[in-house]
Amino acid sequence: MSAIKAKHQRLVLLVIALAALIGAGLLAAWALSKQASYFYVPSDLVAHPPEQGRAVRLGGMVQRGSIKTMPDGVTITFVVGDGKATVPVRYAGITPDLFVEGSGVVAEGRMEGTTFVADNLLAKHDEKYVPREMKDMTQAQAKAVVAETK
């Protein structure tokens, strides 16, 4: 019996390593596709709703006058819009400090009927955001405070 030449042995090892790498990549892609959370704006969600129960993210502006607290004191309902469509949202939990009417929000959750049920809320602030501690300061005072913290 003849032994495999070193050149052929390296080629076989290279093919095996390449096959293992491709297999690992396909396995990772399959796993990530099951965990992916797609992002929708209200007009996309209304036009092309995801299947019921699928994890998605909904982003838009909290409509003014829409935040209502339910009798249990923990659950809130509000409406998220993008100027073209609106989606009612229900959330049970503690809201972020920046969550107010007229602000941006990203809600992570799923559709149940025509209502988006959020498991997590991420509040966004606009580019004019100023921390509470600095809102009454002049620009010079704010610069001095920032310089002291460096």
Image: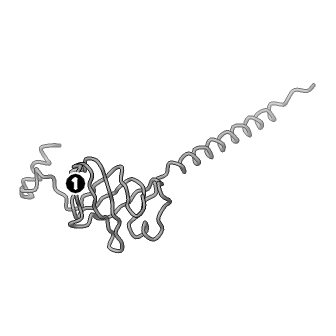
Dividing the picture into quarters, in which one does residue 70 lie?
A: bottom left
Indicate the position of residue 3 as horizontal and vertical percent values: 87, 26
Q: Mark 1 = which residue? A: 98
Point out the image quarter for the N terminus.
top right
Which residue occupies 13% across, 47% down? 147
Dividing the picture into quarters, in which one does residue 90 lie?
A: bottom left
Q: Is residue 5 left or right of residue 129?
A: right
Secondary structure of the residue carrying tag 1 is: loop
Which residue occupies 6% across, 56% down? 136
Indicate the position of residue 20 as horizontal and vertical percent values: 67, 39
Residue closest to the eye, 44 or 20: 44
Residue at far front of view:
71
Residue at far bottom of view:
84
Which residue occupies 32% across, 73% down? 83
Q: Is residue 67 above or below residue 119?
A: below
Point out the image quarter for the C terminus.
top left
Q: Is residue 4 left or right of residue 13?
A: right
Three-letter residue code for mark 1: Leu
Residue closest to the eye, 85 or 73: 73
Q: Is residue 26 left or right of residue 35?
A: right
| Number of marks in the rendered image | 1
Residue closest to the eye, 126 or 149: 126
Which residue occupies 81% across, 35% down? 8
Residue closest to the eye, 29 or 90: 90
